[in-house]
Image (tube, grey):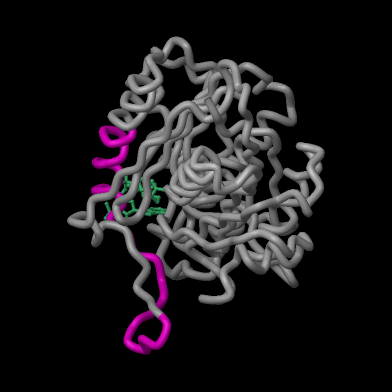
Amino acid sequence: TIRSMLVGVGSYLPEKIVTNDELSERLDTSDEWIRGRTGIGQRHIVSGSENAVYMASRAAQRALDFAGIDPVDVDAVIVATSTPDQVFPATAVRVLGDLGVTNGFGFDVAAACSGFIYALSMADAFIRARNAKCVVVIGSEVYSRILDWSDRGTAVLFGDGAGAVVLQASEDPGERGVLSTHLHADGSTGDLLYIDGAIGRPDHTGHLRMNGREVFRHAVAKLASSVDEALETAGLAASDVSWLVPHQANIRIIEGVARKLQMPMEKVVVTADRHANTSAASIPLALDEAMRDGRIKRGDLVLMEALGGGLTWGSALVRI
Ligand code: ACO
């Protein structure tokens, strides 16, 4: 068997932090409302030269350093983002340039908040098909660019940042590696969460629009069925999972999925309180934190899940 091993993690958060209290000075909202409804206490927001490419390259370099891999040995970079700095060249190709990789390939994936799960699944498929031996998978997002800062219903929910993992082929994986990934999309729910924008459409604002209540209603059920699917495929039970590393949209969605899995919150990695929702970046940001502080160790079974605009959703099960 050939399998993809998760051998490195890295992340980058913008220097500037914006607290709920600071938002309350500009919007009719409060720290109490935001914390109570979402679990979010603050978010990082880009400034100066920080952008999607800059954050992605920093996160990727840190993940390669973690793995002890030289950038020349990278075969591919896949970046999940809905907020690229340019339509093309792809963020991933700019990152290849920053890392100094000249013999690899790269492209971006747009699947909103599920982007990291989509990108991870594709990277794993390239490795298992022997099209690549080492793939850097990145989520990098600058949602501060696409928020309607006058809409309190959405402006308080998101933050900027990037996270990355390195996947490497192993011919002798034992029990370790990417065990299963599952992707879903339902175009009939496209108007619940979308960006009103496209290049060359002056009639569009380019702002994020959301029906929060409806998204919430879909989230827990779809995420729970997707994690069940991942466990079933791998022949494992929820009680085998060492850590749940969910997309960090909202603490109430995270708690809902944990409850369905009967997982205590001590086994769930939560960063929403400090990072808010960084969309495709939130899972690798959380993974990076929990692997560096020693919570997630070699041999641990990690379950990831995400849902976002599309709607798109999915899960991944990885033995570290
Ligand atoms: N501060 C104060 N009041 C607010 C704010 C705010 N920031 N935002 C909305 N309100 C008000 C509304 O105007 C409304 O007032 P009204 O009753 O006078 O009309 C009241 O609060 C309730 O509004 P709802 O939207 O019904 O509030 P709800 O309890 O549904 O919470 C929230 C809103 C937090 C967005 C919730 O629906 C949610 O978590 N949805 C999931 C969506 C999500 O997380 N999306 C992220 C992207 S998708 C993903 O990543 C999964």
Question: Percent position (x, y) of residue 140?
Answer: 59, 57
Question: Percent position (x, y) of residue 41?
Answer: 57, 44
Question: Percent position (x, y) of residue 37?
Answer: 41, 41
In the foreground, 137 or 74: 74
Residue 124 visible to an observer of this rendering: yes
Position of 44 relative to 7 (above/below): below
Q: Residue at x 25, y 41 (%)?
A: 218
In the foreground, 269 or 227: 227
Specify start and end residues of the magenta stretch as a single range: 199-223
Picture quadrant of residue 5: top right
**Does residue 193 appear to the left or right of 302 in the view shown?**
left
In the foreground, 224 or 57: 57
Asked if the stretch drawn in magenta spans residue 215, the answer is: yes
Report the quarter where the C terminus lies: top right
Asked if the stretch drawn in magenta spans residue 255, the answer is: no
Q: Residue at x 54, y 19 (%)?
A: 301
